């Protein structure tokens, strides 16, 4: 689905994106967030004369993505306890359902965490959240039975950039019309991806060799995708937004609802549209938003369409029944402000995390955001220990929140101590 926007891929594994997955099992929601706009940004989102942080700095080979936090340095879990709700419970149930599937075992161990430890950690936290009568009782149990681990972040000091993504609604048609002229395409038969991770490897030639895909501009101009159109949306900006998110709910011109999800991407690099808009001098940094870019597009679609083509990555889609929509890379539904997307190459999947950052209200005001979430998604722009994406929900309101989300913070994981793992009754 990403988010990245971001998916990464705006949200998908690509773009921002959202996603490296086994498509037979997963529908990825990629991300729409400010990251798709910027690609990168300076510390705290403010341009300064100091060297900006590289939030997507890769984890050095052999280095851990998580470090254990000494008890005296734990984050304040009481705030997260106070903000618990039924949505958190729903997201935890979705993670437990994922852990119960035998296929989830293939992703462990990671960061020294076994499948049993990760699964039982979620189960025990669910029990403590349900059964603890007071904040003090909950905290005492967590301190006795759990260890807390922190992402090393982009700088080794735990700094993580949190952007936002959402699941959008768009109007569409199965056939091109004057209103709907921008196509979304099905996955080509010659697209090659890693069977385990879904990472794009290139395109397969008739002789069996694999080569790199053309960039977006060349691919669209070649016409080689003609005949594989899945659906048509209003314009190239709508199409691009869906590319970045990796999935969408479409309101068809015949009144039906159609759900489409990520089916793969080319092996080209993603670059953010917002960054291109800034470079072109079309908006000042403090005015950059998806709505502002939409206004620019409506006034001069040729200019923005040309900037879109600077993003070389190209995403493909497939139709699905929407039963679990919106679903993340684990294949289970994601929950508004309770599901998070991280780099699944380095972080354990499905677990309960504590996010400590700030978010923006619909009026743009910053407010603290310290609460438990579940790690259920990923994205192309969500790479390395210094990036994470908060799922903000479905529809336009969630889109406003996602578009305004760009803040540093810390990311923590809670896992049972080794001597507490085996006592869980499944």
Image (spheres, rainbow, N blue to C red):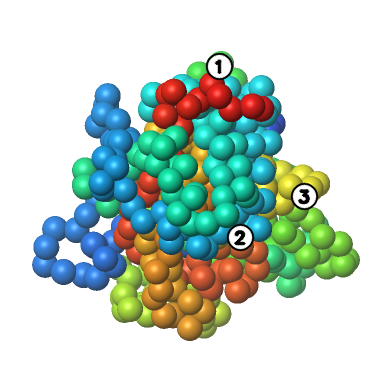
What residue does disc 3 label? 322
Which numbered disc covers residue 71? none
Disc 3 crowd rating (10 Å Cα; few below 14, some 14-19, many 20+) is: some
> Could you say which is closer to the camera, residue 299 or residue 402?
402
Q: Viewed as shown, does residue 285 lie left or right of 113? A: left
Q: Report the Cα–Cα distance between label 1 and label 3.
A: 35 Å
Residue 322 higher or lower than 178, as above or below:
above
- Mark 1 or mark 3, whichever is nearer to me: 3
Disc 2 crowd rating (10 Å Cα; few below 14, some 14-19, many 20+) is: few
Residue 262 higher or lower than 257, as above or below:
above
Look at 56% across and 59% down and name the residue there. Answer: 84
Image coordinates of residue 23 in percent, x first then y, are 65, 34
Which numbered disc covers residue 85? 2
Is residue 58 something that shows in the picture? no
Q: Are marks 2 and 3 in contact (CB under 8 Å)?
A: no
What residue does disc 1 label? 208
Mark 1 or 2, nearer chain start: 2
């Amino acid at each position: 689905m990403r988010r990245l926007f971001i998916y990464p891929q705006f949200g998908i594994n690509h773009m921002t994106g959202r996603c490296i997955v086994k498509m037979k099992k997963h529908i990825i929601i990629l991300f729409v967030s400010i990251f798709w706009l910027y690609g990168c940004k300076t510390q705290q989102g403010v341009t300064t004369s100091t060297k900006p942080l590289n939030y997507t700095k890769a984890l050095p080979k052999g280095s851990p993505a998580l470090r254990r936090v000494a008890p005296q340095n734990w984050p304040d879990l009481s705030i997260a306890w106070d903000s618990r709700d039924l949505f958190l419970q729903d997201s935890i149930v979705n993670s437990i359902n994922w852990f119960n599937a035998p296929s989830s075992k293939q992703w462990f161990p990671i960061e020294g965490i076994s499948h049993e430890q990760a699964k039982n950690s979620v189960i025990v936290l669910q029990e403590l959240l349900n059964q603890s009568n007071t904040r003090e009782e909950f905290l005492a149990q967590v301190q006795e039975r759990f260890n807390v681990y922190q992402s090393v972040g982009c700088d080794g000091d735990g700094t993580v950039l949190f952007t936002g993504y959402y699941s959008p609604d768009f109007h569409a048609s199965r056939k091109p019309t004057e209103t709907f002229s921008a196509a979304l395409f099905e996955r080509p038969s010659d697209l090659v991806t890693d069977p385990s991770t879904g990472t794009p490897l290139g395109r397969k030639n008739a002789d069996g060799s694999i080569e790199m895909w053309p960039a977006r501009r060349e691919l669209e101009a070649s016409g080689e995708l003609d005949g594989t159109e899945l659906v048509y949306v209003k314009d190239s900006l709508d199409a691009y937004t869906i590319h970045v998110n990796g999935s969408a709910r479409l309101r068809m011109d015949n009144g039906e609802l159609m759900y489409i999800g990520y089916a793969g991407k080319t092996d080209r690099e993603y670059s953010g549209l917002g960054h291109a808009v800034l470079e072109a001098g079309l908006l000042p940094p403090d005015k950059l938003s998806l709505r502002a870019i939409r206004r620019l597009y409506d006034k001069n679609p040729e200019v923005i369409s040309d900037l879109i083509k600077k993003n070389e990555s190209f995403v493909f889609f497939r139709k699905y029944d929407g039963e679990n929509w919106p679903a993340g890379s684990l294949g289970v539904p994601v929950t508004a402000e309770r599901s998070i997307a991280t780099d699944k190459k380095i972080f354990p999947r499905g677990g309960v995390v504590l996010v400590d950052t700030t978010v923006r209200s619909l009026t743009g005001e910053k407010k603290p955001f310290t609460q438990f979430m579940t790690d259920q998604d990923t994205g192309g722009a969500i790479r390395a220990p210094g990036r994470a994406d908060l799922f903000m929900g479905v529809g336009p309101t969630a889109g406003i929140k996602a578009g305004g989300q760009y803040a540093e913070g810390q990311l923590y994981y809670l896992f049972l101590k080794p001597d507490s793992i085996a006592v869980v009754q499944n």
